[in-house]
Amino acid sequence: MGETAEGNGTQGLVFASETGEPLDRYRVGRRFKLLLKRAGLPEVRFHDLRHTCATVLLSKNVNPKIVSEMLGHATIAITLDTYSHVLPNMGDAAAGAMDDALS
């Protein structure tokens, strides 16, 4: 029960208990805050890591469709609407690419 095709019992979860069950999100959040405090880092929500990942990937010119799929968004429009603040810097790159193509 709960086995994946790989047979590791995690049900495709990124984080799972020793028995392969989903972790309690509140417990994960509390543990994460404790780790941040011990490391002397500012307090952020665990969910903020997701936004950081998306922002970094988009700023490194990873195809937005790939980022959208990684985040599990239903459509690429959700990703583009949410992270449009990262995309203005890409306009210059697009203009440069077009300039190169026409030169």
Image: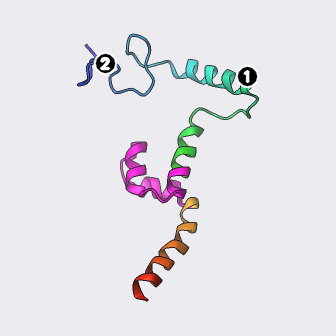
By secondary structure, the bulk of the magenta-drawn segment is best described as helix
Residue 12 location in percent, x, y? 34, 27
Q: Residue at x 26, y 24 (%)?
A: 6
Crowd band around label 2 with a 10 angstrom C-alpha radius: few (<14), some (14–19), many (20+)? few
Q: Residue at x 53, y 63 (%)?
A: 87
Query: The residue under label 2 is which amino acid type?
Result: Asn
Residue 19 location in percent, x, y? 38, 10
The quadrant of the image that shows the C terminus is bottom left
Q: Residue at x 67, y 35 (%)?
A: 44
* Residue numbers of the magenta segment: 56-84
- Report, in whole angstroms, how far the alpha carbon at label 2 lies from the one at label 1: 32 Å
SS at mark 1 in the image = helix
Mark sitting on residue 9:
none
Residue 69 location in percent, x, y? 37, 47
**Which residue is at the front of the view, 12 or 61?**
61
Side of 74 relative to 30 (left or right): left
Mark sitting on residue 38:
1
Question: Which badge, 2 or 1, is on the more N-terminal residue?
Answer: 2
Q: Is residue 66 magenta?
A: yes
Query: The residue under label 1 is which amino acid type?
Result: Arg
